[in-house]
């Protein structure tokens, strides 16, 4: 087996989009992430096309979460992130960026559903109020719209005042998606959002993401390769803190160019 980890980026199969045909929503340039002296990401430059789903796959510890969390500055307090993260012509990794405001555009959903210990309604309205929206009619509208987009309105519309903690795990995760999209971000980052869920809830989350793709650029970490192949347009394969291959999802799963990608998707390691 060839050891591709020592290939330079230009020798790997890293998709670059032609700006004439593809609108890039977000990209990283020369990104390095350090936990103290340990490098969590050494080479992980990707471009993400607007209104597509891009999946980040790879073995445990390969840097998927580190990379994803860097994209909306979730690593600021735990790691040193060097390099550029380009969003609408701005380097959002620079010091003068208002991180709170940036996260209105780039939202995140975590692995474990983490609703607030509040009502279903308040889980969504809370963030809106914090952003200065107080009119009940506006809040009602956005709560409904967000829950509809997260495909759970019909199930909870009569229970909006019930505690979010009483929902099933799958519903809690969809509520977290609803909460994330309530403020209409541009980009949605999801870190293994279905890994704690049963197959039915997982499939519902996948359907929801496919719907959301019409309005959002989605970047999802998953260790579930069937999930990546079912929902994503592009797939990046991470290993040891580097992106080894990035291509259209069909190509990654049927015709990988890098031996290690092939080994991973065939279940030979990871
Ligand atoms: N908070 C942290 N402190 C120190 N090292 C970390 C931390 N988080 C992740 N790492 C290290 O960074 C590397 C990448 O981890 P991670 O991004 O969590 O991988 P993945 O999401 O692919 O499983 C691993 O070697 C991991 O041990
Ligand atoms: Mg992870």
Image: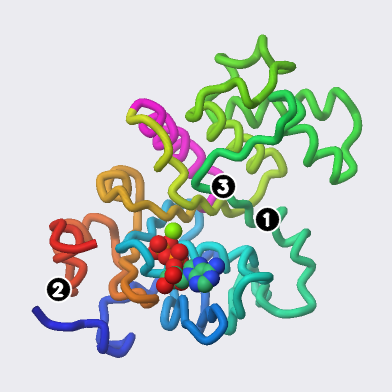
Q: Which residue is mark 2?
A: 259
- Which of the numbered marks, if any, corresponds to residue 105? 1
Q: Is residue 97 magenta?
A: no
Q: Rate crowding at label 2 as few (under 14), some (14 to 19) or many (20 or more) other CA atoms within 10 Å.
A: some
Please tell me which residue is depicted at 47% across the width and 34% down the height of the picture: 208
* Left or right placement of residue 234 versus residue 270 in this view: right
User: Which corner quadrant of the image does residue 78 belong to?
Assistant: bottom right
Q: Rate crowding at label 1 as few (under 14), some (14 to 19) or many (20 or more) other CA atoms within 10 Å.
A: some
Q: Rate crowding at label 3 as few (under 14), some (14 to 19) or many (20 or more) other CA atoms within 10 Å.
A: many
Determine whether 244 is above or below 133 in the image: below
- The residue closer to the viewer here, 56 or 52, is 56
* Left or right placement of residue 24 versus residue 86 in this view: left
Q: Which residues are magenta?
A: 200-217
Quadrant, the N terminus = bottom left
Q: Which residue is mark 3?
A: 109
Give the colouring mode of the picture: rainbow
User: Which corner quadrant of the image does residue 7 belong to?
Assistant: bottom left
Determine whether 198 is above or below 194 in the image: above
Please tell me which residue is depicted at 74% across the width and 28% down the height of the picture: 118
Farthest-out residue, top: 158
Residue 163, how many percent across, how many down?
Answer: 69, 21
What kind of element bears circle 3?
strand
- The residue closer to the viewer here, 15 or 163, is 163
- The residue closer to the viewer here, 108 or 114, is 114
């Amino acid at each position: 087996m060839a050891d591709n980890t020592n290939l330079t980026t230009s020798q790997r199969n890293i998709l670059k989009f032609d700006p004439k045909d593809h609108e890039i929503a977000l990209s990283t340039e020369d990104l390095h992430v350090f936990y103290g002296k340990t490098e969590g990401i050494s080479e992980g430059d990707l471009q993400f096309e607007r209104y597509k789903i891009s999946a980040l796959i790879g073995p445990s510890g390969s840097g998927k979460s580190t990379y994803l969390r860097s994209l909306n500055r979730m690593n600021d307090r735990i790691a040193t992130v060097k390099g550029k993260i380009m969003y609408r012509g701005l380097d959002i990794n620079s010091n003068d960026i208002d991180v709170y405001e940036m996260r209105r555009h780039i939202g995140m959903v975590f692995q474990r559903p983490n609703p607030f210990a509040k009502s279903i309604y308040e889980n969504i309205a809370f963030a809106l109020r914090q952003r200065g929206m107080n009119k009940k009619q506006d809040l009602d509208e956005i709560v409904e719209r967000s829950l509809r987009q997260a495909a759970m309105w019909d199930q909870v519309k009569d229970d909006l005042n019930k505690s979010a903690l009483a929902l099933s795990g799958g519903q809690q995760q969809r509520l977290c998606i609803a909460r994330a999209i309530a403020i209409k971000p541009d980009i949605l980052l999801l870190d293994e959002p279905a890994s704690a869920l049963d197959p039915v809830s997982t499939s519902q989350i996948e359907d929801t993401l496919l719907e959301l793709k019409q309005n959002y650029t989605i970047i999802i970490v998953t260790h579930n390769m069937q999930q990546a192949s079912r929902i994503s347009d592009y797939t990046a394969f991470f290993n040891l803190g580097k992106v080894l291959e990035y291509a259209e999802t069909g190509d990654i799963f049927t015709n990988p160019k890098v031996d290690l990608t092939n080994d991973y998707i065939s279940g030979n390691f990871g």
